[in-house]
Amino acid sequence: MAEEASFFSEVVGLQQQKSDDGVVFPAVLFPNPNASKPVQLTDAIKANKPWLDSLLHRSGAILFRGFPVSTASDFNDVVNSSGYEDFPYGAGVLATRTKVCDRVYTANEAPPDQMIGFHHESSHASEFPSKLFFFCEIEPGRGGETCIVLSHVIYEKMKGKHPEFVEQMEEKGLTYSRVIGEEFDPSSPVGRGWKAAFMTDDKSVAEERATELGMKLEWIGDEVKVIIGPMPSFRYNEVRQKKTWFNRLAVSYGGLKDKLNDDPTKAVVFGDGEQLPLDAVNDLLKMLDEECVALQWCKGDLLLLDNLAVLHSRRPLLAPPRRILASFCK
C-alpha cells in the first residue's frame, strides 16, 4: 500500500463489520494526515484506481470521509475522476429524482419520514448500474441512515433457513406490480406518475416504451398498473463467484405503500402468480435489519457501492434536514 498510503489512511472499527475471512465492510478511507499537502479526492482516486477497484472488489463498499468535497459540482468531479462510464437515468424508472448537474441526481425523493426498503438499484430492469456513488451534501439531523448489507450473505442465510422458498424463487422468479397515477404524488414513496416515468403524455407511446423495457401496462382510467416480470430472483456475481439476493422483494414489502398501493402481498408474487409465504418474507426483513451496517452520514461523506454485491436502504428521517446526492455508473 505504498503509493496509496501517501493519499489514504484506512480505518477499521468505524460503523463496520468484519467477516470470518477478515474482510472489513465497508472499507473506510480518510485523507492521510501525514501527507505533505492537503489530499484532493479526485487526485487520490486517479492515482490509485487499480488499488481502489481491488478494495471495492474485496469489501463491496468504500466510505470516503474527511475529504474537501462540499458541493454537487465537487461530487461530480469525484465521480468523473473514477473513470466509470455514466449510467443514464431514463424512461421506466419510477423513483423520483431531480438532476442537479451533469452526472449528479438527488437520492430517492420519497417522503423523508418513510422507510425505503433494501434493494439493488434497478434490480427489476434488464439493465442496471454496476456501481453507485452517494454524497452527503447536508448531514441528517437525526435518523435517515443509509443501511448496507452484503447480498451474498442474505442469499446464503435465507437458503439455509428457507431452502424451499429460495428454490421456488429460483424456479419461478418474481413478478412486481404497482399502480401509479398520471402526475407526481408527493405523499408517495415512489412519487412519479406514468407521464414522467415514460416521458410522454400519450398512453400508446407509454405502452411502447414499457414494452421495450420489459414491462406491461394495464390501464385503470387515468391510472395504470405497471407489471414487471417474471424477473430472476438472484444473480450470479462472477467476480465474487457467489449468488446474490438480487431482487426487489424487501423494498416492495418494506415501505412502498401509498393510496394506490396498500397491500404488499399484491406488489410482488412468484412468477406464476402465487403469493409469497409471509413467514419467509418476515424473516428476510428481520435478517436484513440484523445483518446490515447503518451508516450515520457526516457532511462531505462519499459512499461507493458495488451494486452487484450490496443491497442498500434508507431509514426514516427523524429530524431534518438531510440531502444525499447520487450518481450511477455502468
Image (cartoon, rainbow, N blue to C red):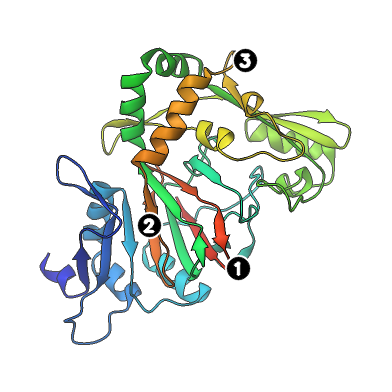
Disc 1/disc 2 C-alpha distance (Å): 19 Å
Please name whichever residue, 172 or 269, is drawn nearer the observer in this view of the structure: 269
Residue 273 — which label?
A: 3
Please tell me which residue is depicted at 20% across the width and 70% down the height of the picture: 9
Q: Which residue is mark 1?
A: 100
Q: Vertically, is 40 above or below 148? A: below
Q: Is residue 188 left or right of residue 45?
A: right
- Counting from the top left corner in percent of width and height, residue 313 is at 48, 47
Residue furthest right as drawn: 221
Cβ atoms under marks 3 and 2 closer than 8 Å: no
- Counting from the top left corner in percent of width and height, residue 194 is at 76, 43
- Counting from the top left corner in percent of width and height, residue 119 is at 48, 40
Q: Upstream in the sequence, badge 1 or badge 3? A: 1
Circle 1: element type: strand
- Counting from the top left corner in percent of width and height, residue 235 is at 40, 30
User: Around disc 3, counting alpha carbons within 10 Å, would you say few (fewer than 14), some (14 to 19), or many (20 or more)?
Assistant: some
Please name whichever residue, 314 or 40, is drawn nearer the observer in this view of the structure: 314
Please tell me which residue is depicted at 62% across the width and 63% down the height of the picture: 99
Residue 97 visible at all: yes
User: Around disc 2, counting alpha carbons within 10 Å, would you say few (fewer than 14), some (14 to 19), or many (20 or more)?
Assistant: many
* Corner quadrant of residue 252: top right
Amino acid type for the residue under numbered disc 1: Val
Residue furthest bottom as drawn: 37
Residue 208 — which label?
A: none
Q: Vertically, is 102 above or below 97? A: below
Q: Is residue 116 left or right of residue 218?
A: left
Please name whichever residue, 126 or 321, is drawn nearer the observer in this view of the structure: 321
Amino acid type for the residue under numbered disc 2: Leu
